[in-house]
Image: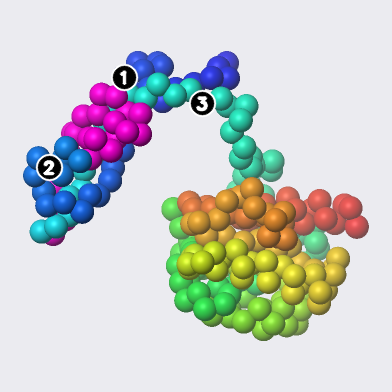
């Protein structure tokens, strides 16, 4: 049974050992390493040992510091979104869609606003997939419409309506001035205004999203970095099955 209070683990339980990497704007040498060690000490790492450093050009140094912290983590205060649905195989997903919808599930994906980074949405949608998993195009009972990059929100709503989308997946990588949050809120509001309760499932994803933000952003789910196509497909099956039962 996991204890409520824990410390980082290094060599022995409760030793509090952590490893931190940082770059200091100081030429490689003892001064750079000393600056990194001093910063680590001020952060509560004691003793702070520099275990690696190397130059990044003439004026910067990358440093790795290792040491112990005294802080405790209270697991009861750790707030995260835990997966409430099982991860399904491709066969299970296809079978579930066929049984619950009796037709193919329509999934529309896009990068909205000025975001031109399609790596994330392509990793989820394209058949080549990500992390050894095939993308949603691989699933026999899913029909995927990938709109690509820099899609205006009104155009996304219009296309989702014309395709009779069951789900809309939006990827956002550009985060300057919280552009990813503002764009997602705009998208969710546009779907609510245009389609009301009949709107499709709305899913947002990107490396800087916090899954706890879903309600705040007005979407049904938020996925962060490292999300796999199988996780997304399993969620869509779970959410749509629940939606059909409620309806």
Q: Is residue 38 above or below residue 144?
A: above
Q: What's the mark number on residue 73?
A: 3
Task: Report which residue position mark 1 lands on.
Answer: 11
Any magenta on residue 135? Answer: no
Give the image quarter of residue 52: top left
Is 208 left or right of 157, judged from the image as shown? left
Give the image quarter of residue 169: bottom right
- How packed is label 2: few (under 14 Cα within 10 Å), some, or many (20 or more)? few
Which image quarter is the N terminus in?
top right
- How packed is label 3: few (under 14 Cα within 10 Å), some, or many (20 or more)? few
Is 67 left or right of 204, judged from the image as shown? left
- Write down the region rendered in magenta: 36-57
Query: How far apart in space, not on screen, are marks 1 and 3 (Cα)?
Result: 18 Å
Q: Is residue 153 above or below residue 90?
A: below
Q: Residue 197 location, x and y as percent?
A: 86, 66
Residue at image position (48%, 71%) is 118
Residue at image position (73%, 50%) is 238
Q: Residue 233 location, x and y as percent?
A: 63, 56
Of labels 3 and 2, the one closer to you:
2
Of labels 1 and 3, the one closer to you:
3
Query: How far apart in space, not on screen, are marks 3 and 2 (Cα)?
Result: 33 Å
First along the sequence among labels 1 and 2: 1
Mark 3 touching mark 2, by CB under 8 A?
Answer: no
Asked whether residue 28 is in view, the answer is yes
Which image quarter is the C terminus in?
bottom right
Query: How far apart in space, not on screen, are marks 1 and 2 (Cα)?
Result: 29 Å
First along the sequence among labels 3 and 2: 2
Is 226 left or right of 235, judged from the image as shown? left
Q: Residue 195 location, x and y as percent?
A: 83, 73
First along the sequence among labels 1 and 3: 1
> Mark 1: which secondary structure?
loop
């Amino acid at each position: 049974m996991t204890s409520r209070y824990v410390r980082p683990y290094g060599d022995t339980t409760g030793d509090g050992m952590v490893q931190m990497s940082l770059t200091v704007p100081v030429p490689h040498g003892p001064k750079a390493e000393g600056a990194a060690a001093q910063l680590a000490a001020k952060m509560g790492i004691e003793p702070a040992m520099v275990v690696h450093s190397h130059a990044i050009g003439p004026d910067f140094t990358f440093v790795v510091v290792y040491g112990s912290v005294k802080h405790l983590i209270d697991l009861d205060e750790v707030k995260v979104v835990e997966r409430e649905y099982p991860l399904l195989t491709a066969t299970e997903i296809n079978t579930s869609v066929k049984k619950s919808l009796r037709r193919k599930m329509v999934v529309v994906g896009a990068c909205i606003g000025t975001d031109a980074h399609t790596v994330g949405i392509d990793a989820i949608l394209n058949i080549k997939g990500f992390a050894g998993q095939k993308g949603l195009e691989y699933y026999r009972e899913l029909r995927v419409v990938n709109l690509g990059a820099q899609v205006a929100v009104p155009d996304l709503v219009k296309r989702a309506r014309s395709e009779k989308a069951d789900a809309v997946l939006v990827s956002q990588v550009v985060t300057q001035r919280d552009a990813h949050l503002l764009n997602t809120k705009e998208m969710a509001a546009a779907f609510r205004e245009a389609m009301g309760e009949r709107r499709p499932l709305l899913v947002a994803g990107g490396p800087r999203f916090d899954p706890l933000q879903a309600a705040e952003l007005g979407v049904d789910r938020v996925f962060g970095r490292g999300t796999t196509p199988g996780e997304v497909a399993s969620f869509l099956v779970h959410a749509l099955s629940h939606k059909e039962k409620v309806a």
